[in-house]
Image (cartoon, rainbow, N blue to C red):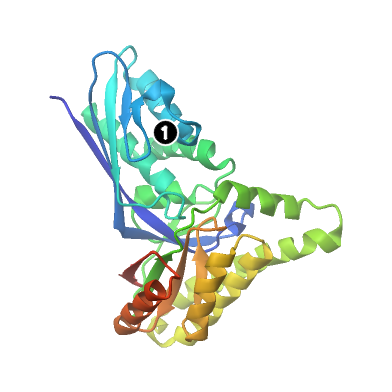
Amino acid sequence: MKTGIGKAHGKIIFMGEHSVVYGYPAIALPFRAVEMTAKITPSDCSTTLDSDLYQGDLLSCPPHLTNIKLLIEKLMMDYLPNQHTHVQVTSSIPAERGMGSSASVACAIIRAFFDYLDQPIATDTLLKYADFAEEISHGNPSGLDARLTALDQPLLYRKNEPITPFHFQTPYWLVVADTGIPGETKAAVAAVREGVDQEKITENQPFSDALHHLGKLVTKLRACLVDTQAHNRYAELSSLINQAQQDLKTLTVSSHALDQGISYCQTHHVPAKLTGGGRGGCYLALANNKAQAEQLAQQLENNGLAIKTWLMPFAS
């Protein structure tokens, strides 16, 4: 049987959430601990979808899967008109956690379609379809998730500017913790927009200032990481991370569960911030070494501050 397979990993935004939508830079990292796989095979009478969230005819997809539904329909119309396929999606990426699950499923499906067609896929083509799906998911996305998932490198990204991959090495370790509460990216993006658009300067200024400051923090962060002495700059990195979280709280995109986990880390002298759209989802902490990371991850789970944690070296 003819088969097409496509894979895509997750991502974490290290710094620059929300401000990236307003033209400021953001830094994001591939998160290879989690992965999405799509498999496409022929179908006789209708196009169907099989995933953890829905199994059945594509036309009957629930509203929260509209991005997948319309993406598959567009790919079918562009490349397989008057044909039907069965699309199977398996994932270890938790949905609505700021790990780029929507971009990852889009990239995996697109890659699977082109594999099914026995055609190579150019990066710009992959991004064109991924952006189409992301706009349906998030309204006004930055485009960062799709680019990070497609390129598989740490990225400095600024909207409407060339993407800048970069490399860095540190001895530090990241702990990524899942609050167990779905994030609300679309609502968070809308809330920031509402704050920025307030008529009174006393109401919009805190939002504008926080976005501007986040942009400055990202610039300082990249300079820190590419420095050959990055392994000696833990204190500076810690300060940048904690300041970023304060800006995100000003933007109203944090949550009680996020604040609890982040405060626990900070109380134990480990910098932490939310990652992704916010209002739920995940947060990250930067440990000084692997042993500290392992201990912190265990403590977060034991204290009910995370339903799951992942560790990764903080390096490209």
Residue found at the far left of this picture: 1
SS for dot 1: helix
Nearest the eye: 126 or 7: 7
Task: Give the residue at x 38% y 24%.
Answer: 58
Name the amino acid type tagged 1. Answer: Ile
The spot of residue 228 in percent (x, y) is 38, 81
The spot of residue 94 in percent (x, y) is 38, 52
Which quarter of the rendering shows the C terminus?
A: bottom left
256 up-or-down from 293: above or below = above
Tell whether 284 sits left or right of 260.
Answer: left
Q: Give the labeled residue for mark 1.
A: 68
Task: Give the residue at x 35% y 84%.
Answer: 292
Tell whether 306 sits left or right of 243.
Answer: left
The spot of residue 208 in percent (x, y) is 73, 61
Task: Give the residue at x 32% y 37%.
Answer: 51
Q: Is residue 120 visible to the viewer in this orientation of the structure?
A: no
The spot of residue 284 in percent (x, y) is 45, 69
Total of numbered circles in the picture?
1
Nearest the eye: 294 or 157: 294
223 up-or-down from 1: above or below = below
Q: Is residue 135 visible to the viewer in this orientation of the structure?
A: yes
Q: Quadrant of residue 227?
A: bottom left
Q: Quadrant of residue 111?
A: top left
